[in-house]
Amino acid sequence: MATDIISTLRGIVGDGDVLTGRAASDRTTVWETHQPCNAKAIVRPASTEQVAAIMKVCFELGQSVVPYGGLTNLVQGCATTPDDIALSFEKLNAIEEIDTTAHTMTAQAGVTMLSAQEAADREDLFFPVDIGARGTCMLGGNVSSNAGGTKVIRYGMMRDSVLGLEAVLADGTVVSSMNRFIKNNSGFDLKHLFIGTEGALGLITRIVFRLSVKPQTHNVALVACSDYDQVVAVLNKAKTLLGSLLCGFEVMWSDFYETVTQPKGNLRSPLSESWPFYAIVEAMGTRPGADDENFESVLGEMIESELILDGVIAKSDKEREEIWAIRGEVEWLVKDCYNFDVSLRIADVGQYIDQVMSRIESDIPGSLVAAFGHLGDNNIHVSVLCEGNKTVHAETIEKHVYESLVPYQGAISAEHGIGLEKKPYLPISRSVEEIELMKSLKRSMDPKNILNPGKVVSLN
């Protein structure tokens, strides 16, 4: 059957867009997310119609299909087996329209986030979702994983930027729900079946995004605090005094900060002393001069009240980029660490991290637990670096990270999704009834279980 289906797929997309053998297996991911291509073939459609034709064939033959985007996810959401077909969206890479009156963008699923941001910027508009993998990740993957990033406080998750989309179901049916309106209560809002469901219910091919007004001011500060309670106090004061201008608030525990800055790391620290906690405060607005003065005034007030022990405000684009580069220095984590992203109440984060650090360091002497993340929207990343084979300590580390969430009713995934990696721990965050409903949706929309099988929930 393998030879027959490969031949059929070549008839749909052309010989050059069905990659087999070394042409498929030698493909590597820029972010080294440990998802080698084990599929029997990579298929590269160039239109929704071709995706539909591919899925119709695969449905008839019971052929499993794994969606391939930028492969930057960290939960093995694109992991393949030799029985799978990998369906790549790299040729679905057109920005079809930017409506400067309605502030919308219509784009195909294979457009990178960076390309979308740059296209919006050229029209004096703003694509509000931003993550570190912006240059590689694709919009279809961003939507299907409900990406978050650094500006969620103000602009929300990817879900909040999607007005409509088009998706191909398991049997090749095209569901085109390309809504362009902010308000549309015409029955079920079907786009939510595909946002955040990791390609398990359908393959997103086109999306309508809601853009924002382009900010005219951009202020960033790096501040230092003595303890976690002080960090929370700074966050609350920033929310109060900056209001809707506040778009990002990132926290870094000292273990993370000191690993990436000199003398241990490669980056220069803008602060001369070492502190237990660091935070990045980011604000964007539309009033040049007034917004800058307000930002300086807010930071000054927090220094005077000793909420902030040290700090620096970026005075140029270069300085702003240097501050964010510290927070964005994560390639060493992606490559060598066990990586987790969790959500819980802001008030509980400090105690939770203390417990996780204590338990892991007790069981694995010499390990490094680096904590950092989007505190303003309840999301903390935990990365663990330890000696030896990466699989040896996996169970111990996962147990401490996930089971420590239980008393706080936390979520095992804030923005990375579930994939294969987090699936065994899904019951920590979702009830039996919720998981059964997920399975019911999967059975209804993908009765042969061919779309990204085994990810998120299992039907066997």
Image (spheres, rainbow, N blue to C red):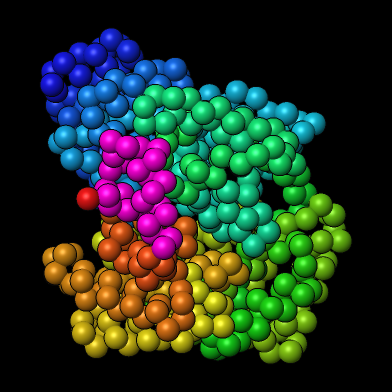
Classify residue 365 as left or right of residue 189: left
Which residue occupies 23% across, 29% down?
A: 62
Establish if 128 lies above or below 202: below
Observer-nearest of 356 and 164: 164
Which residue occupies 44% across, 25% down?
A: 173
Establish if 456 lies above or below 275: above
**From this viewpoint, is residue 142 visible?**
no
Residue 449: in magenta span: yes
Quarter holding residue 165: top right
Residue 84 spot, x, y in % from top left: 21, 34
Which residue occupies 57% across, 58% down?
A: 150
**From this viewpoint, is residue 126 visible?**
yes
Classify residue 68 as left or right of residue 346: left
Residue 248 spot, x, y in % from top left: 63, 63
What range is drawn magenta here?
433-459
Which residue occupies 71% across, 84% down?
A: 303
Residue 257 spot, x, y in % from top left: 44, 73
Residue 445 spot, x, y in % from top left: 40, 38
Residue 282: in magenta span: no
Observer-nearest of 221 and 444: 444
Please identify the quadrant where the N terminus is shown: top left
Quarter holding residue 291: bottom right
Establish if 326 lies above or below 135: below
Q: How many marks?
A: 0
Observer-nearest of 418 and 24: 418
